[in-house]
Image (spheres, helix red, strand yellow):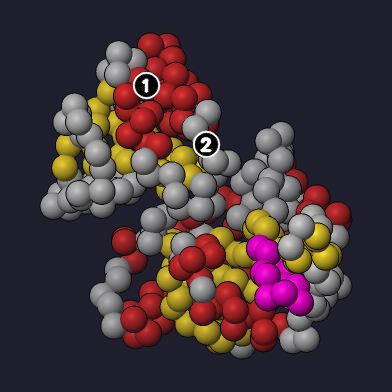
Amino acid sequence: MIVYNQQGVHLEEAKEKPFILEKDIQNLFEANLKAIMGLQLVKSEFTIKNKRIDTLAFDSEAKAFIIIEYKRDKNHSVVDQGVSYLNLMLEYKADFIIEYNESLSQNLKRDDIDWSQTKVCFVSPSFTENQKQATNFKDLSIELWEIKQYTNGVIIIDPIRKSASAPSIKPIAKQNELLEKVAKEITEYTEEYHLKNKSPYVIELYESFKNGILNLPGDIEVVPKKTYIAFKIKTNVVDIEIQASSIKLWINLKKGQLDDSKNLMRDVSMLKGHNGNGDYELIVKDTRNLEYILSLVKQAII
């Protein structure tokens, strides 16, 4: 990617400005953690069992802890360190809960956490192809995020996506005791997971809405979660739960923000514990209102 400054009708290439310290990257991420990754900062420089974690964060949507490590250079093994941190978290769960409660004055309990969604994220100006390939497993909870800054004050943050054909880590994990231990606790939720044992009718219904949503403006990404499938750009636009004879969807807008002239959507702003994000919910059993519903979803695209 080439970044330019605009000078009238002329473009001048912006020069990349290297980060001097890893701490500079850390400070930038921690100050903007919600905007960048949708996470809540729990603790900076969290030390446990003689290991120092750069950033301990919490994913309120997945109900899981996330460890973030920052690297200014490319000379490190992200897999070895990542698996080590995943094992540390899964082995000392109580310590992470105590830190969360003490740092944020909360009363989080062990059963409130979905430990299967635990992740380690590495943030660096660049990663080698070997590092990208080494983490390209669909059920390896290690993510890579590249960050670059330029002389014009522009910051570009690019999460490295796993390929659509990424294999499972489980066959390889059998050769490594620590990796196998971690792999048993981590669950990768997929569309197949949600569609398993569902009727052909419901699968076709879901595919119709999925295709319609993906054709809306913006680079919408399909991100399966434990209880629903999220469609997101930066944040969730719409969430879909696959049911026995229907699909349930939530549009991620607050009460009063949706123009729904047909009054199809249900207001769930006062309902505690519903799965998806947003204050608008709808159970769909057919495609009769597909185009209209897509026009509602479009309103949530920022």
Q: Position of residue 74 (x, y in %)?
A: 84, 70
Q: CA distance from mark 1 to mark 2?
A: 14 Å
Q: Position of residue 292 (x, y in %)?
A: 32, 24
Is any atom of residue 275 visible in this view?
no
Q: Quadrant of residue 102?
A: bottom left
Q: Which mark is residue 291?
A: 1
Determine the residue positioned at 32% across, 27% down. 293
Q: Is residue 222 left or right of residue 78?
A: left
Name the kind of residue labelled 2 in the image: Pro
Q: Quick one: label 1 or label 2, which is nearer the N terminus?
A: 2
> Residue 241 colored magenta?
no
Q: Residue 41 versus residue 32: which sits nearer the camera?
A: 32
Q: Residue furthest left?
A: 270
Q: Quadrant of residue 298?
A: top left
Is any atom of residue 119 visible in this view?
yes
Q: Is residue 120 left or right of residue 235?
A: right
Q: Position of residue 251 (x, y in %)?
A: 32, 41
- Indicate whether 268 appears above or below 23: above
Name the kind of residue labelled 1 in the image: Glu
Q: Residue 243 versus residue 267: which sits nearer the camera?
A: 267
Q: Residue 129 versus residue 300: which sits nearer the camera?
A: 300
Q: Which residue is mark 2?
A: 217
Mark 2, Cα crowd under 10 Å, few <14 / some 14-19 / many 20+, is few
**Residue range of the region highlighted in magenta in the rendering:** 147-157
Mark 1, Cα crowd under 10 Å, few <14 / some 14-19 / many 20+, is few
Determine the residue positioned at 66% across, 79% down. 25
Q: Is residue 196 left or right of residue 30?
A: left
SS state under label 2: loop
Q: Residue furthest front?
A: 8
Q: Position of residue 2 (x, y in %)?
A: 81, 58
